[in-house]
Image (cartoon, rainbow, N blue to C red):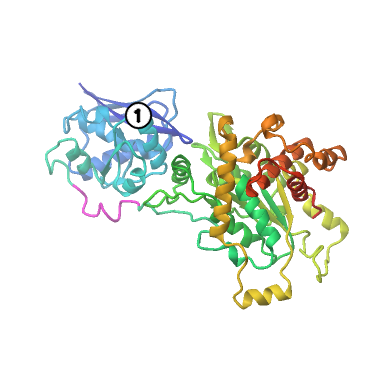
Amino acid sequence: MANARSWGIALSGLRGDAVQVDVQLAAGLPKLLIIGLPDAALGESEHRLRAAMHSSGHPLPAKRLTVSLSPAELRKHGAGFDLAIAAAVLAAAGIIDPAGPARNAHLGELALTGAVRSVSGVLPAVHAAKTLGFSQILVPAAAEHEASLVDGINVVPIASLADLAEHYGAAPGKLTTPDDVSTSFVIDADAGAQPDAVGSDRAQDLADVVGNEAAVRALVVAAAGGHHLSMIGPPGSGKTMLAERLPGILPDLTADAAIEVAALRSLKSMSVGTTLSRRPPLQAPHHSASAVALIGGGSGMIQPGALSLAAHGVLFLDEAPEFSRRVLDSLRQPLESGTVTIHRARGSVTYPANAQLVIAANPCPCGNAGAAGLECRCTPHQQRGYLSRLSGPLMDRIDLQLRVERATVAQARMAAAGARGETTTAAAREQVQDARARALERLRSFGMHRNSDVPGHLLRRPELRPAADASAPLDAALQRGQISMRGYVRAARVAWTLADLDAADRPERNHITEALFYRAREC
């Protein structure tokens, strides 16, 4: 009887747990048994391992092999445990020194040829291994660049079972390497990558927006305070153009936020690039998206949705009234809390949901209601019913509500002649960074960094109140029922952002009035 041990990583969302892989090689009928709550993909590891060992020139011993994955009560998903199982089996069979696998983490799927394939979630698994105290992790060679984005842990690329054996001291040639291991049987790290639906070209400049300075101003305010934004206007008024340029004026991500964004993309098998991107993400799902696609979920391993993939960036919902109302309303709680917890019968997973929501909508089904010089073909009932698909509680969570108009003939001619808008992306980003620096200085002691994060009770503190007579318009709007108490708090947050943009010590009456304009404007 021989025993050996190795380690794998079980992911639950972005969190990882160490899984001890124990292998016992004993006399008996040839059989490989995996215990410890494996799912179907992991249960098939026996067949992949048997074929991979045979292809590598060293078939599994004709004995009884028992593989135990502990803790036994923790469910294990996917084929990413293949490499850990293979390492323990090779150690139990006497091919490699058992001491090596017993102290390292392993991640990878076996091909039938003996090659090691990449799997989803490499980056969060490596980050979890580092957090759990491992100093070294073995990963598929195709995922080396992704795994190397995590500092503080030694990443060893493994292309085949032969590489695994040689890394742990087996004599070269003990196992054979498949001829095509570097091409046909190794999944490229970018395979299945899903680029952002909108705005993948970050070179688009805010100066491309000609003649709509009010909308540009609202965009800068949204970026400076982290506020949600809605734009309602006829087709061709520039709503999508504006939304595409919002990520460009947001500040760079911190290192921790960039790792989190990359880890979420890794869970969805999306490309994370060869270097860690510090630019905020943009997600723009189609209006046919389901609640699961938007919020996250699924059977088996719970996957993040578009809201979480847009964390620390922008979630853009174009043609928002065309989304299912149930899908839109599923955003309400995550937008308020900044996280989304997805519950299933077998457990729950929490993902970040701190994205800025930007919605764009036509004012009616034909799009022409209220537009100068355009005839609306919709009945009053159709006009009212169209925007009513955006529920009151959802709109109440959107700080900046803007009407966007089409460019005039003169403005269109200026744009055709190459004219540029007054505000460039570089200038707007500098404004945003200065405003956020002021907010951070004020809010650091409260553990926050953006005005949109400030809870209502803190806004009543003396150091966070507006000037003495400044809040009179806000009080009056609340008394008349034009805004709710949530709207009162959100308008106060916007007023602080406007004050930060003007380098004012606290909001004045003009800041309160402009904040109310963004909330109470009739669209």
Residue 217 colored in magenta in the image: no
Looking at the figure, which quarter contains the C terminus?
bottom right
Q: Residue at x 82, y 42 (%)?
A: 473
The image shows residue 414, relative to residue 261, as above or below, that is: below
Q: Quadrant of residue 500?
A: top right
Q: Residue at x 78, y 47 (%)?
A: 513
Residue 353 appears in the figure: no
Amino acid at circle 1? Ile
Q: Does residue 440 appear to the left or right of 473 in the view shown?
A: left
Q: Nearer the viewer, residue 451 or 483?
A: 451
Residue 362 pos. (x, y %): 74, 59
Q: Nearer the viewer, residue 468 or 375?
A: 468
Residue 31 pos. (x, y %): 28, 30
Q: Which residue is mark 1?
A: 34
Residue 273 pos. (x, y %): 40, 52
Q: Residues within 10 Å of mark 1 (few under 14, many from 20)?
A: many
Residue 132 pos. (x, y %): 37, 28
- Report the magenta stretch's main SS: loop
Q: Residue at x 52, y 50 (%)?
A: 281
Looking at the figure, which quarter contains the N terminus?
top left
